[in-house]
Image: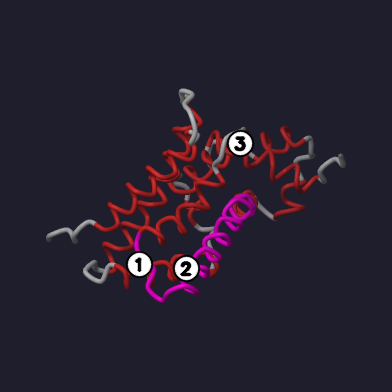
Amino acid sequence: MATPDTRTQILDAAEHLFAEHGYRGTSVRAITTRAGANLAAVGYHFGSKAELMAAVARRVVEPINAAQCAGLDRLLARTPDPPVTDLVEAFAGPMMDGMRAGDAGARTSRLIVTILSDPAEEVRGWTGSAEGSVRERYLAAFARALPGLSPEELRFRLRGILAVTAVDGLEVHQQATPGCGSPGPGEAARRWAISFLAAAMSAPPTRT
C-alpha cells in the first residue's frame, strides 16, 4: 500500500484532532507532529489553520451532500411531492451511512458534532454554495410536504435532523450495543431514527 502524501497525512491528522479537541483546542504544531510533517507544511498545502479546517470539513461533508442530492433526485424522479418519511431518509440516511461502525465512523461522528457545535467562527465559516444548495432543495421539498410550517420553523426542524443524527451517531460509538438477532442493531436503529425524525418533522406547527 502506498504511503499517503503529506497533504493527506495532514488532513488525516487534523480530522482526528479537530474531532477530539475542537478547532481552538488543536494547534498547528499538534497536527504536524501527528502527521509527521514540518510546521510549515500546513501553510504550504492549505494556507492557514482555518483553511485546513475547511478542507477537513469538506472532505467529510461533500460525499454526504452528494448522496443527499442523489437521494432527492431519485425521489423527485418518482413524484414531484415525496412524503415526509422518504425525504427524511434521503436527507439523514447519508449521514447515518457516514457514521457506521469502526474507527472511521466514530471519527466522522465526532467531527460532524464538532462542525455543528464548535463555537469557533472558523468551523462555521467553511460552507459554500454547494452546501447551501442541498439545504435549499430539501427545504423546498419539505415545504411542499408540510405546507402548514413557517419557513423559520421548517429550517429549525431541518437543523434538528442534523443535530439528532450526529449526536445519536456519536452515542452509538461511545456505548457498547448489546447483541441481538437479525436485523442488526444498526439497521433497527436506522428505522427507529427515521421514524422518530419523520414524526418530529410532521408535528403540527408550534403555536406562537
On screen, residue 17 versus residue 125, left or right, reads right
User: Main structural element of the magenta stretch: helix, strand or loop?
Assistant: helix
Report the amino acid beneath label 2. Leu
What residue is drawn where x is 69% and y is 55%? Answer: 47
Q: Which residue lies furthest to the right in this view?
A: 2
Q: Could you say where residue 181 lies in the image, as x and y percent from the top left?
A: 48, 28
On screen, residue 103 versus residue 25, left or right, reads right
In the image, 92 versus 183, the foreground residue is 183
What residue is drawn where x is 56% and y is 59%? Answer: 67
Q: Is residue 62 above or below residue 9?
A: below
Q: In which quarter of the image is the C terminus?
A: bottom left
What residue is drawn where x is 22% and y is 56%? Answer: 203
Q: Could you say where residue 144 lies in the image, as x and y percent from the top left?
A: 32, 73
Report the amino acid beneath label 3. Leu
Q: Could you say where residue 59 lies in the image, as x and y percent from the top left?
A: 64, 53
- Residue that badge 3 annotates: 17
Q: Which residue lies furthest to the front in this view?
A: 182
- Residue that badge 2 annotates: 75
Helix, strand or loop at mark 1: helix
- The boundaries of the magenta stretch are 55-84
Q: Say whether residue 77 is magenta.
A: yes
- Residue that badge 1 annotates: 142
In the image, 162 versus 125, the foreground residue is 162
Report the amino acid beneath label 1. Phe
Q: In this view, does 18 lie above or below 85?
A: above
In the image, 111 versus 119, the foreground residue is 111
